[in-house]
Amino acid sequence: MSSRRRRIYEGKAKILYEGPEPGTIVQYFKDDATAFNNQKKGTITGKGVINNRISEYLMTRLNEIGVPTHFIRRLNMREQLVRQVEIIPLEVVVRNVAAGSLAQRFGIPEGQALPRSILEFYYKNDQLGDPMVTEEHITAFGWATPQDIDDIVALALRVNDFLSGLFLGIGIKLIDFKIEFGRLYEEEMVRVVLADEISPDSCRLWDLKTNEKMDKDRFRRDLGKVEEAYQEVARRLGILLDPGAGDHRGPATVQ
Protein backbone atom coordinates (compact mmCIF):
# COMPACT_ATOMS: atom_id res chain seq x y z
CA MET A 1 0.00 0.00 0.00
CA SER A 2 1.66 3.19 -1.13
CA SER A 3 -0.35 5.77 0.82
CA ARG A 4 1.51 7.04 3.85
CA ARG A 5 -0.98 6.94 6.66
CA ARG A 6 -0.64 8.25 10.16
CA ARG A 7 -0.40 5.48 12.73
CA ILE A 8 -2.78 6.23 15.58
CA TYR A 9 -2.27 3.27 17.86
CA GLU A 10 -0.52 -0.07 17.95
CA GLY A 11 -1.94 -2.84 20.11
CA LYS A 12 -0.89 -6.42 20.66
CA ALA A 13 -2.69 -7.83 17.60
CA LYS A 14 -3.63 -4.79 15.50
CA ILE A 15 -2.43 -1.41 14.28
CA LEU A 16 -4.88 1.46 13.78
CA TYR A 17 -4.24 4.01 11.04
CA GLU A 18 -6.00 7.23 10.13
CA GLY A 19 -8.83 6.39 7.71
CA PRO A 20 -9.39 7.79 4.21
CA GLU A 21 -12.26 10.01 5.33
CA PRO A 22 -13.05 11.77 8.64
CA GLY A 23 -14.61 9.50 11.26
CA THR A 24 -12.98 6.36 9.83
CA ILE A 25 -10.03 4.24 10.90
CA VAL A 26 -8.10 1.49 9.12
CA GLN A 27 -7.64 -1.56 11.34
CA TYR A 28 -4.61 -3.66 10.36
CA PHE A 29 -4.35 -7.25 11.64
CA LYS A 30 -0.87 -8.45 12.65
CA ASP A 31 0.44 -12.01 12.98
CA ASP A 32 1.81 -11.22 16.44
CA ALA A 33 0.34 -13.29 19.23
CA THR A 34 0.51 -12.55 22.93
CA ALA A 35 -0.83 -14.28 26.01
CA PHE A 36 -0.90 -13.73 29.77
CA ASN A 37 -0.97 -9.94 29.40
CA ASN A 38 1.94 -9.83 26.98
CA GLN A 39 4.24 -12.10 29.04
CA LYS A 40 4.24 -14.71 26.29
CA LYS A 41 4.88 -13.53 22.74
CA GLY A 42 5.07 -15.22 19.40
CA THR A 43 3.96 -15.15 15.78
CA ILE A 44 1.18 -17.19 14.22
CA THR A 45 1.81 -17.13 10.48
CA GLY A 46 -1.18 -15.85 8.54
CA LYS A 47 -3.23 -15.21 11.69
CA GLY A 48 -3.86 -11.58 10.77
CA VAL A 49 -5.27 -12.55 7.37
CA ILE A 50 -7.59 -15.19 8.84
CA ASN A 51 -8.76 -13.00 11.75
CA ASN A 52 -9.49 -10.14 9.35
CA ARG A 53 -11.73 -12.45 7.31
CA ILE A 54 -13.43 -14.12 10.28
CA SER A 55 -14.08 -10.80 12.00
CA GLU A 56 -15.43 -9.31 8.75
CA TYR A 57 -17.79 -12.28 8.36
CA LEU A 58 -19.07 -12.24 11.97
CA MET A 59 -19.43 -8.44 12.16
CA THR A 60 -21.35 -8.46 8.86
CA ARG A 61 -23.69 -11.17 10.10
CA LEU A 62 -24.25 -9.28 13.38
CA ASN A 63 -24.96 -6.07 11.44
CA GLU A 64 -27.58 -8.00 9.47
CA ILE A 65 -29.50 -8.96 12.63
CA GLY A 66 -29.41 -5.37 13.90
CA VAL A 67 -26.42 -5.41 16.26
CA PRO A 68 -24.70 -2.06 15.66
CA THR A 69 -20.96 -2.42 15.01
CA HIS A 70 -18.05 -0.20 13.99
CA PHE A 71 -17.35 -2.36 10.92
CA ILE A 72 -17.71 -0.78 7.45
CA ARG A 73 -15.88 -3.10 5.03
CA ARG A 74 -12.74 -5.15 4.47
CA LEU A 75 -10.15 -3.34 2.36
CA ASN A 76 -7.64 -6.12 1.63
CA MET A 77 -6.15 -9.24 3.17
CA ARG A 78 -5.03 -7.57 6.38
CA GLU A 79 -7.05 -4.37 6.68
CA GLN A 80 -10.59 -3.31 7.29
CA LEU A 81 -12.28 0.08 7.39
CA VAL A 82 -14.14 0.85 10.61
CA ARG A 83 -15.94 3.80 12.13
CA GLN A 84 -13.99 5.84 14.64
CA VAL A 85 -15.48 5.28 18.08
CA GLU A 86 -14.58 6.33 21.58
CA ILE A 87 -13.61 2.98 23.11
CA ILE A 88 -15.25 2.23 26.45
CA PRO A 89 -12.32 0.95 28.57
CA LEU A 90 -13.93 -2.39 29.39
CA GLU A 91 -13.43 -5.92 28.17
CA VAL A 92 -16.78 -7.68 28.26
CA VAL A 93 -16.49 -11.45 28.65
CA VAL A 94 -19.45 -13.78 28.11
CA ARG A 95 -18.97 -17.32 29.41
CA ASN A 96 -21.13 -20.35 28.54
CA VAL A 97 -18.82 -23.15 29.70
CA ALA A 98 -16.19 -23.10 32.47
CA ALA A 99 -12.69 -22.52 31.06
CA GLY A 100 -9.59 -20.42 31.60
CA SER A 101 -9.54 -18.02 34.55
CA LEU A 102 -13.13 -18.78 35.61
CA ALA A 103 -12.36 -22.50 36.00
CA GLN A 104 -9.24 -21.60 38.03
CA ARG A 105 -10.93 -18.95 40.21
CA PHE A 106 -13.82 -21.14 41.30
CA GLY A 107 -12.26 -24.57 41.03
CA ILE A 108 -14.77 -25.69 38.39
CA PRO A 109 -13.60 -28.41 35.99
CA GLU A 110 -12.82 -26.97 32.56
CA GLY A 111 -15.58 -27.93 30.12
CA GLN A 112 -18.42 -27.94 32.66
CA ALA A 113 -21.49 -26.12 31.34
CA LEU A 114 -22.42 -23.09 33.45
CA PRO A 115 -25.95 -22.85 34.93
CA ARG A 116 -26.47 -19.85 32.64
CA SER A 117 -24.34 -17.53 30.56
CA ILE A 118 -22.20 -15.38 32.85
CA LEU A 119 -21.16 -11.87 31.84
CA GLU A 120 -18.03 -10.32 33.36
CA PHE A 121 -16.37 -6.90 33.06
CA TYR A 122 -12.63 -6.28 33.10
CA TYR A 123 -10.97 -2.86 33.18
CA LYS A 124 -8.82 -2.46 30.05
CA ASN A 125 -5.39 -1.71 31.48
CA ASP A 126 -2.36 -3.83 30.60
CA GLN A 127 -0.22 -2.38 33.41
CA LEU A 128 -2.78 -3.59 35.94
CA GLY A 129 -3.37 -6.90 34.18
CA ASP A 130 -6.96 -6.04 33.14
CA PRO A 131 -8.53 -6.49 36.59
CA MET A 132 -12.09 -7.77 36.92
CA VAL A 133 -14.52 -5.02 37.94
CA THR A 134 -18.16 -4.69 38.97
CA GLU A 135 -20.83 -2.29 37.72
CA GLU A 136 -20.17 -0.29 40.91
CA HIS A 137 -16.57 0.37 39.87
CA ILE A 138 -17.58 1.16 36.29
CA THR A 139 -20.15 3.81 37.25
CA ALA A 140 -18.14 5.22 40.20
CA PHE A 141 -15.04 5.80 38.06
CA GLY A 142 -17.07 7.09 35.12
CA TRP A 143 -15.93 4.48 32.56
CA ALA A 144 -19.55 3.99 31.51
CA THR A 145 -22.99 5.18 32.59
CA PRO A 146 -25.74 2.88 33.90
CA GLN A 147 -27.43 3.33 30.49
CA ASP A 148 -24.21 2.35 28.68
CA ILE A 149 -24.00 -0.77 30.85
CA ASP A 150 -27.63 -1.70 30.05
CA ASP A 151 -26.88 -1.34 26.33
CA ILE A 152 -23.64 -3.33 26.62
CA VAL A 153 -25.29 -6.19 28.52
CA ALA A 154 -28.22 -6.39 26.08
CA LEU A 155 -25.90 -6.35 23.04
CA ALA A 156 -23.42 -8.84 24.56
CA LEU A 157 -26.21 -11.35 25.25
CA ARG A 158 -27.58 -10.95 21.70
CA VAL A 159 -24.10 -11.49 20.29
CA ASN A 160 -23.77 -14.61 22.46
CA ASP A 161 -27.12 -16.04 21.33
CA PHE A 162 -26.35 -15.42 17.68
CA LEU A 163 -22.74 -16.65 17.71
CA SER A 164 -23.57 -19.74 19.81
CA GLY A 165 -26.14 -20.80 17.21
CA LEU A 166 -23.92 -19.94 14.27
CA PHE A 167 -20.95 -21.94 15.61
CA LEU A 168 -23.14 -24.84 16.73
CA GLY A 169 -24.33 -25.14 13.13
CA ILE A 170 -20.74 -25.80 12.00
CA GLY A 171 -19.87 -28.21 14.81
CA ILE A 172 -18.16 -25.74 17.15
CA LYS A 173 -18.97 -24.98 20.80
CA LEU A 174 -18.67 -21.31 21.79
CA ILE A 175 -17.13 -21.67 25.25
CA ASP A 176 -16.62 -17.96 25.97
CA PHE A 177 -15.56 -14.76 24.21
CA LYS A 178 -14.33 -11.23 24.85
CA ILE A 179 -15.78 -8.20 23.10
CA GLU A 180 -15.31 -4.45 23.34
CA PHE A 181 -17.68 -1.57 22.78
CA GLY A 182 -17.33 2.06 21.78
CA ARG A 183 -19.41 5.20 21.64
CA LEU A 184 -20.27 6.27 18.10
CA TYR A 185 -21.03 9.99 17.81
CA GLU A 186 -23.48 10.69 14.97
CA GLU A 187 -24.92 14.20 14.65
CA GLU A 188 -26.74 14.76 17.95
CA MET A 189 -26.78 11.07 18.87
CA VAL A 190 -24.42 8.82 20.78
CA ARG A 191 -24.77 5.06 20.27
CA VAL A 192 -23.00 2.17 21.94
CA VAL A 193 -21.67 -0.12 19.20
CA LEU A 194 -19.66 -3.34 19.04
CA ALA A 195 -15.99 -2.55 18.26
CA ASP A 196 -12.57 -4.24 18.04
CA GLU A 197 -12.81 -7.77 16.53
CA ILE A 198 -14.36 -11.20 16.95
CA SER A 199 -11.94 -13.99 16.03
CA PRO A 200 -10.24 -17.12 17.42
CA ASP A 201 -7.98 -14.63 19.24
CA SER A 202 -10.91 -13.42 21.33
CA CYS A 203 -13.14 -16.53 21.52
CA ARG A 204 -12.72 -20.00 22.98
CA LEU A 205 -13.95 -22.41 20.33
CA TRP A 206 -14.03 -26.18 20.87
CA ASP A 207 -14.88 -28.86 18.35
CA LEU A 208 -18.34 -30.15 19.25
CA LYS A 209 -17.42 -33.84 18.94
CA THR A 210 -13.82 -33.98 20.16
CA ASN A 211 -13.54 -30.86 22.40
CA GLU A 212 -10.37 -30.08 20.41
CA LYS A 213 -9.40 -26.44 21.01
CA MET A 214 -9.64 -24.26 17.88
CA ASP A 215 -8.51 -20.91 19.29
CA LYS A 216 -5.67 -18.98 20.94
CA ASP A 217 -5.49 -21.49 23.83
CA ARG A 218 -3.43 -23.61 21.41
CA PHE A 219 -0.82 -20.82 21.52
CA ARG A 220 -1.23 -20.10 25.25
CA ARG A 221 -0.75 -23.76 26.18
CA ASP A 222 1.80 -24.74 23.54
CA LEU A 223 -0.57 -27.26 21.95
CA GLY A 224 0.82 -26.66 18.46
CA LYS A 225 -1.06 -26.48 15.14
CA VAL A 226 -2.32 -22.97 15.91
CA GLU A 227 -2.45 -21.82 12.27
CA GLU A 228 -4.31 -25.00 11.29
CA ALA A 229 -6.93 -24.47 14.00
CA TYR A 230 -7.61 -20.88 12.87
CA GLN A 231 -7.79 -22.04 9.25
CA GLU A 232 -10.26 -24.79 10.20
CA VAL A 233 -12.58 -22.23 11.85
CA ALA A 234 -12.47 -20.13 8.66
CA ARG A 235 -13.08 -23.22 6.51
CA ARG A 236 -16.14 -24.27 8.51
CA LEU A 237 -17.52 -20.74 8.32
CA GLY A 238 -17.22 -21.08 4.54
CA ILE A 239 -14.63 -18.32 4.25
CA LEU A 240 -12.15 -18.80 1.44
CA LEU A 241 -9.00 -16.75 1.73
CA ASP A 242 -8.08 -14.66 -1.32
CA PRO A 243 -6.03 -16.85 -3.63
CA GLY A 244 -2.80 -15.24 -4.77
CA ALA A 245 -3.54 -11.76 -3.43
CA GLY A 246 -0.35 -10.10 -2.27
CA ASP A 247 0.13 -10.40 1.45
CA HIS A 248 1.73 -7.25 2.74
CA ARG A 249 3.15 -6.07 6.01
CA GLY A 250 1.16 -2.86 6.35
CA PRO A 251 1.40 0.63 4.92
CA ALA A 252 4.34 2.93 5.39
CA THR A 253 3.55 5.38 8.16
CA VAL A 254 4.34 8.94 9.00
CA GLN A 255 4.61 9.82 12.66
Image (cartoon, rainbow, N blue to C red):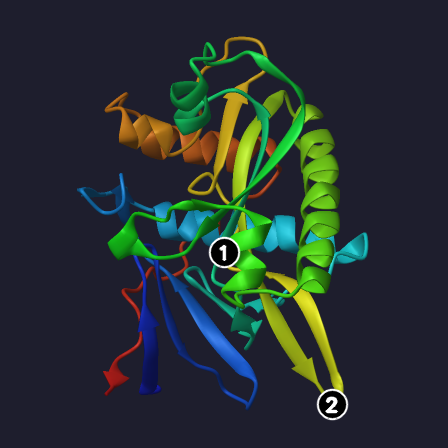
Q: Who is closer to the viewer here, 69 or 143?
A: 143
Q: Quadrant of the N terminus?
A: bottom left
Q: Position of residue 45 (x, y in %)?
A: 27, 44
Picture layout, residue 248 above or below residue 199:
below
Tag 2 and tag 1, C-beta contact below 8 Å: no
Q: Where is residue 2 in the image (x, y as percent from the top left)?
A: 32, 84
Residue at 72 percent of width and 51 percent of height = 155
Q: Can residue 151 be seen in this view?
A: yes
Amino acid under disc 1? Leu
Of the image marks 2 and 1, the number of the one nearer the N terminus: 1
Amino acid under disc 2? Glu
**Mark 1 packing: few (<14 Cα in 10 Å), some, or many (20+)?**
many
Q: In which quarter of the image is the C terminus?
A: bottom left
Residue assigned mark 1: 90
* Label placed on residue 187: 2
Q: How far apart are marks 2 and 1 (CA)?
A: 25 Å
Q: Who is closer to the viewer here, 184 or 116?
A: 116
Residue at 50 percent of width and 44 percent of height = 199
Picture layout, residue 134 above or below residue 151:
above
**Mark 2 packing: few (<14 Cα in 10 Å), some, or many (20+)?**
few
Q: Can residue 1 be seen in this view?
A: no
Residue at 70 percent of width and 34 percent of height = 166
Residue at 34 percent of width and 55 percent of height = 13
